[in-house]
Image (cartoon, rainbow, N blue to C red):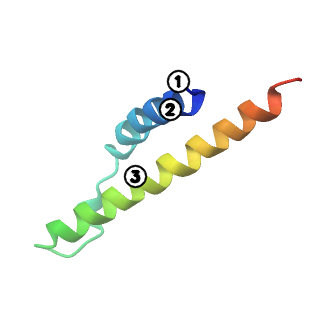
């Protein structure tokens, strides 16, 4: 398997763990639970993608051929 798959797994756990500390429901209006969940989902996807690609680029640039 590629290193990128392991990074995705590790970063997914780290992002979900870190987003758990944010009270996103305080940002939204009352009774807008689904909008808050959709926002949380897309925010998590974006962070997972960005952090994984950043770490993978650092990993690739560190390899000496």
Which residue carries the number 3 mark? 44
> Closer to us: mark 3 or mark 1?
1
Image coordinates for residue 35, horizontal then vertical, percent: 23, 71
Q: Residues within 10 Å of mark 3 (few under 14, many from 20)?
A: some
Secondary-structure class at tag 2: helix
Q: Nearer the viewer, mark 2 or mark 1?
A: 1
Q: Give SS at disc 3.
A: helix
Q: Any mark on residue 18, and which?
A: none
What residue lies at 17% left-to-right and 67% top-to-bottom? Answer: 34
Dots 2, 1 in contact, CB < 8 A = yes
Residue 64: quarter of image = top right
Q: Vertical placement of 7 versus 32: above or below?
A: above
Residue 58 image offset from top left, x and y in percent: 74, 36
Q: Mark 1 points at which residue?
A: 1
Q: N-terminal of the two: label 3 or label 1?
A: 1
Decide: is 5 above or below 49.
above
Label 2 neighbour load within 10 Å: few <14, some 14-19, many 20+: few
Distance Cα–Cα, label 2 vs label 1: 7 Å
Q: Image height check: is 49 above or below 31?
A: above
Which residue has dot 2 on it?
Answer: 5
């Amino acid at each position: 398997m590629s290193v990128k798959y392991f990074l995705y797994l590790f970063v997914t756990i780290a992002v979900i763990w870190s987003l758990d500390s944010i009270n996103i429901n305080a940002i939204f209006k009352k009774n807008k639970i689904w909008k808050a969940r959709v926002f949380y989902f897309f925010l998590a996807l974006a962070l997972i993608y960005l952090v994984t690609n950043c770490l993978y680029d650092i990993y690739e640039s560190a390899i000496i051929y």
